[in-house]
Image (cartoon, rainbow, N blue to C red):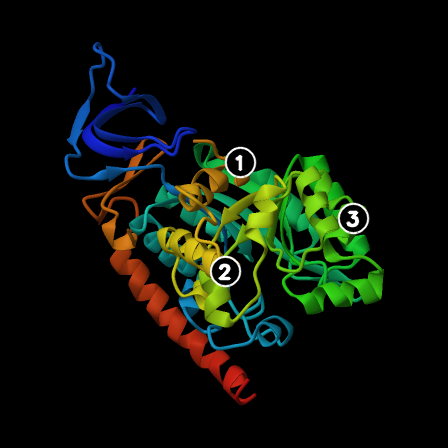
Amino acid sequence: MAKILIRHADIITLDEAGRVLRAADVAIVDEFIVAVGEAPADFAPDEVIDARGRILMPAFYNAHTHSALALLRGLGGDLSLDRWLNERIWPRESVLTGDDVYWGAALAAVEMIRSGTAAFADHYFYMDRVAQVVSESGLRASLAWCTFGGPEGEIGADLPAVARFVEEWQGAAGGRIRTLLGPHSPYTCSPMFLARTAAVAARLGAGIHIHVAESADQDALSQTIHGVSPVKLLDQNGVFDVPVLAVHAAALSPTDIEILAARQVTVVQCPSAYMRAGMPFAPVSRLLDAGVRVALGTESAALGGRLDMLREARQALLLHRYVSGDATTLPGDQALRLATQAGAQALDFFAGGAIDVTDLLVAGRWLMRDRALLTLDEERILYEATRRGLALAAAAAPAALSRGPV
């Protein structure tokens, strides 16, 4: 049983009272914090860390990303939302191999550890390879294998294959891995496919990670084809019968917000990606006021640029205050809570800038000490990611550039 005592830290507790403790102690036994403020008199640590002059706070939880696309950082930043989504410029299963996904996820893991992120919710392909990275890195993750299904059939892994992945990896890596179903969105998946996915998720006791209502155009399309909004469509087909991460949720009616609140859906916002790509974003203040759970994510590095959750908290604060014209939007430490506690709850884990992060402790294990990575071979990862990223970018760039300016 490992015991760690961190002493003299300035602690941002993010507790209900929003306390900041000065020169305080934290006592840890294995993966559990047993005391904050002052260690028990009889606590006999195996390791004592003097954190004088440092800030100690809960780690960040990235509630939506596509980790493998760290190989293609910034590729989609100058593309409009409809081109990024509808023209399928972003790589699919036929472009990235399982090895590419492994090294892209490993590169993302390096960046997340260095920026103080303890867990991430991934939504892409070859999730078994991402699970390998999670196992090796010491991070926590909620992994959803992206699927598409409509009248023309299923694209990529089919539901039985995804179900096998969910069962095999659920609770793996000492409980650090959670698995979900990952239908891409209501506009790429038929109602029947969504209903089938929801039924599989319910049978397996798993949740669903899905893009929802990313724009007014998507809402209008759903109203034309199905007669209801994307949110209502998901509710009608049983998707909200299980825990759901609803990503983006930019086009919401008052009725949609009521459904999300009643069904305890978590809406995930990715502010940096929205600003970089000129994308719409959800009415976060109205969602929070209605009791909807809200968490933050980075989107992919291809769209958002970086996987820095402290930046996302800051961007969320600035973006929503600017748009609302109200300096009291997301008051106090609420933006930090969206990037930490809310993400931890959304991923079913309870537990400055990236350059300011010096150490990361996850499940009682040091992943980084004094900025030195302890679980990943950063030099090898950078070599593989650079080699593969250049090849993938060379293949993808002509398709994007040939269409001319937006």
What SS does tag 3 mark? Answer: helix
Q: Which mark is residue 397?
A: none
Which of the two discs, 1 and 2, labels the residue nearer the N terminus? 2
In front: label 1 or label 2: 1
Q: Amino acid at mark 1?
A: Asp
Q: Quadrant of the C terminus?
A: bottom right
Q: Which mark is residue 195?
A: 3
Q: Amino acid at mark 2?
A: Gly
In front: 330, or 86? 330
What SS does tag 1 mark? Answer: loop
Which of the two discs, 3 and 2, labels the residue nearer the N terminus? 2
Count of picture labels: 3
Figure check: 77 above or below 329: below
Q: Which residue is mark 2?
A: 98
Q: Which mark is residue 348?
A: 1
Q: Amino acid at mark 3?
A: Ala
Q: Position of residue 50 (x, y in %)?
A: 14, 31
